[in-house]
Image: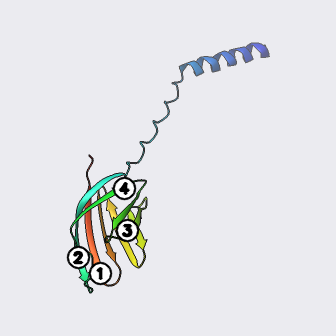
């Protein structure tokens, strides 16, 4: 009699398992984060000029690759810079520092060497 009950119990469990809904499909993978790479164009303005040798403000083009770019300070000096995942922008060359922020497709920042200062704003332009 115990074996009949065990068989009936097993049949009930199998029948109930067949009625259960299948598990939900796995969630699709998250999309990759948008790339920062591209060409950014804009302008710069001067906010400090305590020397005749300060760079001139004007048009700015930045080529961002692997979240990094070089800003041309003058004919001979380039400021190597990077963009952190949180949007912080920072760079340095000789006595020059660059600090800024990326928000969406826009990068804004300031460069200074203590005597000269430029503020720049650039926007990504996909070509």
Does residue 68 sit above or below 3 in this rendering? below
**Residue 5 rendering spot, x and y as whole percentages:** 73, 16
**Residue 71 rendering spot, x and y as whole percentages:** 34, 65
**19 or 81, nearer to the observer:** 81
Which residue is tagged 1?
116
Q: State the CA–CA distance, disc 2 to disc 4.
A: 23 Å
At 41% from the left edge and 48% from the top edge, which residue is drawn? 33
Q: Is residue 17 left or right of residue 72?
A: right
* Kind of element beneath mark 3: strand
Which residue is tagged 4?
64
| Nearest to viewer (mark 3 / mark 2) | 3
Does residue 36 sit above or below 18 in this rendering? below
**30 or 113, nearer to the observer:** 113
The quadrant where residue 107 appears? bottom left
* Kind of element beneath mark 2: strand
Which residue is tagged 3?
78
Q: Earlier in the sequence, mark 1 or mark 4?
A: 4
Q: State the CA–CA distance, disc 1 to disc 2.
A: 8 Å
The quadrant where residue 123 appears? bottom left
At 28% from the left edge and 56% from the top edge, which residue is drawn? 40
């Amino acid at each position: 009699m115990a074996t009949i009950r065990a068989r009936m119990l097993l049949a009930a469990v199998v029948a109930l398992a067949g009625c259960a809904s299948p598990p939900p499909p796995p969630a699709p993978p998250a999309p990759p984060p948008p790339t920062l790479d591209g060409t950014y164009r804009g302008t710069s303005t001067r906010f400090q000029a305590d020397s005749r040798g300060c760079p001139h403000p004007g048009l700015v083009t930045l080529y961002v690759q692997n979240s990094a770019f070089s800003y041309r300070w003058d004919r001979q000096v380039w400021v190597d810079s990077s963009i952190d995942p949180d949007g912080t922008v920072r760079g340095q060359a000789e006595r020059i520092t660059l600090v800024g922020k990326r928000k969406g497709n826009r990068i804004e920042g300031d460069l200074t060497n203590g005597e000269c200062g430029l503020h720049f704003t650039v926007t990504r332009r996909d070509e």
